[in-house]
Image: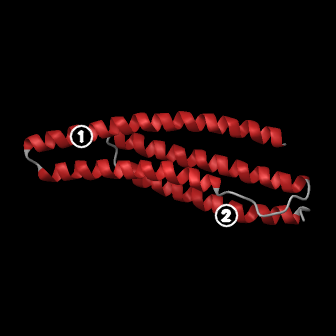
């Protein structure tokens, strides 16, 4: 069981690296588009669109920094507080790690989607992605409360 979890975690780590690289590419593209919009607005003398471009760039950077700092910290904090009392506890620990890995990938995908939508100029990309990240966090919180209960019910210490 532990070998299968280690294989899955290795796959998720590789996917994490690919998605982080793609997020970086789309951040650069998005910032380029925002800078070009701001430059054109400045050339035309429109202060409102310049302000919008500056705030969009700051919002995009803050969203990406939040994702890159918060998601790893959240995943590292996933632990199970049950003592090691047999295969049921090992299964509970494996389930917690799998839930954390899937949750991290879902949060990273939402970040990628928001950044990509912002890069192409789609409205409400970052706000929808932030909402999806909140849903994943709520699901992980619910799972972290349920897994120890189920482990104890099925025969853990």
Residue 85 rendering spot, x and y as whole percentages: 90, 59
Element at label 1: helix
Label 2 sits on residue: 142
Q: Which disc is residue 6 wearing?
A: none
Q: Quadrant of the C terminus?
A: bottom right
Which one is nearer the viewer's eye here, 41 or 84?
A: 84
Query: On screen, 61 above or below 155?
Result: above
In the image, residue 30 sits, relative to residue 124, either above or below, namely above
Q: Nearest the camera: 122 or 54?
A: 54
- Left or right: residue 10 versus residue 138 is right
Quarter of the image holding residue 28?
top left
Q: Residue 48 location in percent, x, y?
A: 16, 53
Picture quarter containing residue 17?
top right
Percent x, y for residue 106?
57, 47
Tell how many labels: 2
Judge whether residue 124 can be spotted in this image. no
Q: Which mark is residue 35?
A: 1
Q: Residue at x 80, y 55 (%)?
A: 92
Q: Residue at x 53, y 59 (%)?
A: 134
| Element carrying mark 2 | helix
- Please say if the residues under marks 1 and 2 sit with CB atoms less than 8 Å apart: no
Tell me the distance, in whole angstroms, between the alpha carbons under discs 1 and 2. 41 Å
121 shown above or below 99: above
Outermost residue, left direction?
Answer: 45
């Amino acid at each position: 069981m532990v070998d299968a979890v280690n294989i899955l975690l290795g796959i998720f780590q590789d996917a994490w690296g690919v998605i982080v690289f793609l997020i970086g590419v789309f951040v650069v593209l998005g910032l380029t588009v925002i800078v070009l919009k701001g430059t054109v607005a400045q050339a035309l003398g429109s202060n409102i669109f310049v302000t919008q471009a500056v705030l969009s760039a700051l919002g995009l950077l803050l969203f990406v920094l939040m994702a890159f700092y918060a998601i790893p910290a959240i995943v590292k904090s996933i632990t199970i507080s049950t003592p090691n009392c047999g295969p049921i506890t090992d299964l509970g620990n494996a389930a917690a790690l799998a839930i954390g890995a899937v949750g991290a990938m879902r949060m990273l995908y939402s970040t990628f989607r928001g950044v990509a939508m912002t890069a192409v100029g789609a409205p409400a990309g970052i706000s929808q992605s932030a909402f999806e990240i909140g849903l994943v966090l709520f699901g992980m919180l619910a799972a972290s409360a349920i897994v120890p209960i189920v482990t104890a019910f099925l025969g853990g210490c």
